[in-house]
Image: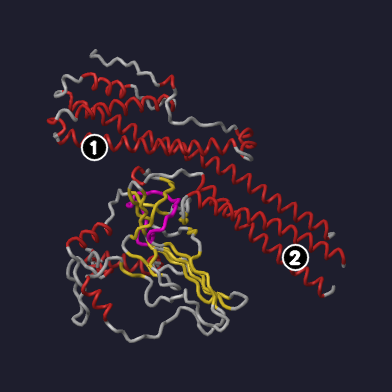
Amino acid sequence: MNPSTGAAMFAIVLVGVVVAFLVVSTYNAVIALRNRIRKAWANIDVALKQRHDQLPNLVEAVRGVMAFEQDVLLDVTRARAAYTAADPIPRQAAVSEQTSAAVRSLFAVVERYPEIKSAANVAALQEEIARLENIIADRRELYNDQVFRYNTRIAQVPTNFLAGAFGWTPEPFFAAEETERERPAVDISPA
Amino acid sequence: MSDDASLLLVLAALGIAGGIALLVRGFGGYRSAVRVGDTATSRISSLAAGEVRVTGTIEPAEVTITSPLQARECVWYRSEVTAGRDGTTTFKDERGVGFRIRDATGSIRVFPRGAHVDAPDRLDDKDSPLGERPPSVTVRTGSPFQTQVAGDRESEIAALLTVHVPEPVDEPFDRSERGLHYVEARLEVGDVVTVVGTAVPFGHLDDPDGADLLDRYGDPLAGLDDPEVAMNIAEAREAGILTTPEEAWGNAAIPGFGIGRPVRAPELDAAATVPVLATAAEADTITRTWDLEPDLLVLAAARDAPMLVATGAPGDVVAREEGRFLLGLLGAVLAIGAAIAGAVVLAAQ
């Protein structure tokens, strides 16, 4: 083989190796990013379900004493009833925000009732729900950060060339859209 | 072929080899940059199981180790001594122990076995032309393992005031070699690190003792995998010899015994130095740190996801790894240039 041809072939092969590495690495990185988003969402979902399961216990524990605070209890119950795991993410974000706000109001009212606040089971439930609220807030940030990284990545060169070919589209943030912020209309009156 | 042409061809071959080596290293840097950069930072208090990225400050767990070339307390070191112009390695060691990482929300235990550690060199020095050791090198004496639990004040003062007869230092490398080059990287208590690893419940670790050590050039627990040792243990267990930890391990089953602060009196030979018992507070600390709850999340390497421990905040790590990738691309350019130069030399003959 002519030395010049050999050198040219070497250069072409080396450039080809670099390009192939970048394409394969970029594809794998985007797939990993999508899976991280799914995992982050699944972790939020677990915490939302745990909070959903704990709320009735808290409402039951305080219902008898807080006879004059039915609006607050109603807000919590209404927000809890609006939770559906199969809803789109923006809708779930809106419901989650409303639930958190209702729970904060309930905690504020409980402060006014020393006899409830001092009850061991109410204190334990309050602590557990507050822990879950913190976990949801942290995991929501993590999810949104992961979505931000993914959406940025697929919009950048050279990934945007691959995005069209593989049908990668931006993922939604865990944030309530304006249309989702309305109070959910759920009938909780006794049948 | 003339001598000049031969020399140029050798240089071209070296350029190709060096360029490809840089490129391969750059590929590794790119993969690390993508892995660190594409994973969001988790808060330790709300960590979920699975692959996570955590950034925080290193805290000691049960023990720390001492680096061989500068005798500094650390949780990981990689040390190398090379000699001569050809850089023959006369000493090489990489070792780490489990540690904790703390962020603003809490701390988590890290089991570093199998981790890839990316830490800049803290020592990079050479012997003087007369063969004198540089002042930055203080060779460690004794074992790399040292206790984290402090002794009592009186005995520490007594030890400081005692005059010791100098003993010859048993150096881990050959001092008869001239022109030694010392390089050491470390992770020390208080360093900020970014860890990308897998959060798993402590009870899910196959081999917690082994996972707690990183020893690149000789696993001290390798013997535990020996089929003959396993058979002997199984036989002893069947014979009822290994019924309780106390019977199986003797004094070693006492919490804190290995670090010189047992929580109760051990059975010792009459001639042995009796260790000082731990105070109630120390006993509580020892028991707490040595007994992790099975459900407690810890960071470890998974089979399909190796752990990366890198010095600095995520942005610093990504910048460093991307720099390595750019250097790799320059290596590709160097290799291509060297190949063209070689072809020109060959064509001219």
The residue that mark 2 highlights is: B12
- Image point (66%, 47%), residue name: A20
Tell me the element at label 1.
helix
Seen in the image, is B342 located left or right of residue B285?
Answer: right
For the record, the magenta segment spans: B189-212
Front-lying residue, A9 or A150: A150
Above/below status of B141 relative to A99: below
Q: Please, which residue is most extreme toward the top here?
A: A191
Closer to the camera, B266 or B44? B44
Q: Is residue B318 above or below residue B248?
A: above
Disc 2 chain ID: B
The amino acid marked with disc number 1 is Glu
| Residue A94 location (% of width, % of height) | 39, 25
Query: In the displayed structure, would residue B53 be above or below residue A146?
Result: below
Q: Amino acid at mark 2?
A: Ala
Residue that badge 1 annotates: A127
Q: Which image quarter is the N terminus of chain B in?
A: bottom right
